[in-house]
Image (cartoon, rainbow, N blue to C red):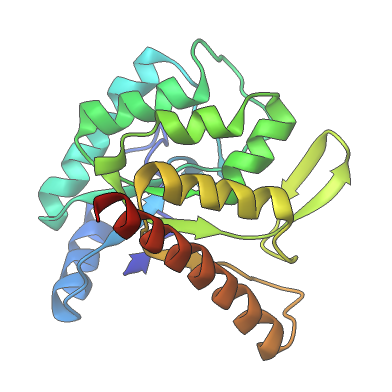
Amino acid sequence: ICHGLSLSIGSPAPLDEHFLIRLKKFLDKHNIRCYSEHLSYCSDNGHLYDLMPIPFTQEAVSYVAKRIQRVQEILERRLVIENVSYYAAPGQEMTEIDFLNGVLEQADCDLLLDVNNIYVNSINHKYDAESYIKSVPSERIAYLHIAGHYDEAEDLKIDTHGADIIDPVWQLLETTYQHHGVMPTLLERDFNIPSVASLISEVNQIRQYQSAQEDNDVARTA
């Protein structure tokens, strides 16, 4: 798996096809089966050094889908897009989940489902996180992300990848496995790095949720 930060799939600027050609050579050389990027933009007239939200509009769905299709043509592999955290939704004409599903269907691409981003957005924008998770098409999910965040206020969470995972996010991961099945899951931690033992403890907790769901699946089919 390779995960990118600079494709800027929603940017008004043209796709950097020279970058994509170099990227394809890298992916081919190292036999990378899965390449994921963010459903956002991070450049216009220069690099913005942040992941900015794409307006939730039908026009944006069509625009982004065409760009994803072009990326897939150049890379000769399916692109996996990640749902991102956001703190404002300028020009919003549809819900976040309708926008995401619209892009997935029109572009015919796959999804990196970030469970913590769903939790953060559900608090900040007041929607039901479990309903969001259950509305995602299972067949498009390639893998999952889970991480911690910062509590700026009771109704404002900041996606930081710099804290331990809290119980409501663990519960959403469990819901994801229950609804979509067990999938590869990556623990993200970018700073405030704890001890190796603490990180291993969180990795083991992921495995426990996965094992419990696998046992439940076996019991249902027995």
**Residue 40's spot in the image, x, y percent?**
47, 40
Q: How far from the left and from the top, in percent, is residue 147?
A: 62, 60
The vertical placement of 191 against 180, above or below, is below
* Furthest residue toward top: 93
**Residue at image x 48%, y 36%?**
133
Q: Name above or below for residue 5 compared with residue 25.
A: above
Depth order, front residue of 88/101: 101
Q: Residue furthest front?
A: 222
Picture layout, residue 131 above or below residue 16: above
Is residue 222 depicted above or below 45 in this figure?
below
Location of the C terminus (image quadrant) = bottom left
Q: From this viewpoint, is residue 88 visible?
A: yes
The quarter of the image holding the N terminus is bottom left
Q: Is residue 58 left or right of residue 17?
A: right
The part of the image, by quadrant, that contains residue 77 is bottom left
Q: Which residue is depicted at the point 43% across and 58% down?
A: 213
> Which residue is depicted at the point 45% across and 64% down?
210
Residue 202 as seen in the image, left or right of residue 75? right
Q: Name the side, left or right, on which 213 lies relative to 203.
A: left
Closest to the observer, 94 or 143? 143
Q: Position of residue 207 (x, y in %)?
A: 49, 72
Q: Is residue 27 left or right of residue 50?
A: left
Q: How many marks?
A: 0
Closer to us: 218 or 45:
218
Residue located farthest toward the bottom when viewing the structure as drawn: 196
Q: In this rendering, does residue 16 appear at all? A: no
